[in-house]
Amino acid sequence: MFKNLNLNLLGRSQMSTVLVQDRMRRLVDSGLRGSCRPAALTSELKKRAKEIDDPTLTAMERVFFGFADKTRLKILKLLAGQELCACEVMAALGLTQPTTSHHLGILERGRLVASRREGKWVFFRLSSPRVREVLRKSRSLVKEVP
């Protein structure tokens, strides 16, 4: 499989680099990537990867983390209908106060929900109508995907 490669003499990161280079060479040799050179293909891919905006990815990660839990999705669906106090979310979903606060905090950090304080009460709402739209489109996508 790895002709002419003496992997025993290499460190872990060097071995990884050699294995990746070998795979890129085999991909190019297969003809699936045209007639480019493996090094040129690798260089182009690395250049494209560096162009990805890290702050945007970090923000996207927070948003998708908010969507990546059934309880948080239920909270978002509730808030799509109306602004709710944290205790109303607790009552609707049968959650404890710490669990509710944990999930609402994640949703706030992901900027999916916004809150306002009225005395000792904290009310939550979707931060944007676009969150409701994402929920709707996600539901549609799930129904379409086999």
Image: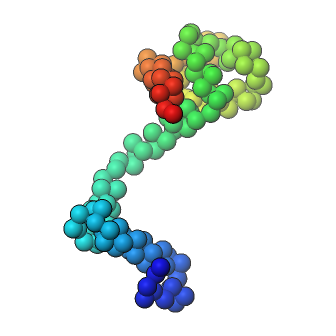
Give how far across and how far down residue 134 sits, in percent. 45, 24
Q: Quadrant of residue 36?
A: bottom left
Residue located 39% across and 42% down the image: 56
Give how far across and how far down residue 28 sits, in percent. 30, 68
**34 and 13: which one is in front?**
34
Tally of numbered tags: 0
Q: Is the residue 8 above or below the residue 140 in the image?
A: below
Residue located 58% across and 18% down the image: 77
Q: Quadrant of residue 27?
A: bottom left
Horizontal arrangement in the rendering, residue 139 relative to residue 32 (left or right): right
Q: Is the residue 38 above or below the residue 107 in the image?
A: below
Q: Is the residue 118 above or below the residue 131 in the image?
A: above
Give how far across and how far down residue 50 sits, in percent. 33, 57
Q: Quadrant of residue 55?
A: top left
**Is residue 72 visible from the viewing direction of this image?**
yes
Residue located 55% across and 88% down the image: 8
Residue located 73% across and 30% down the image: 99
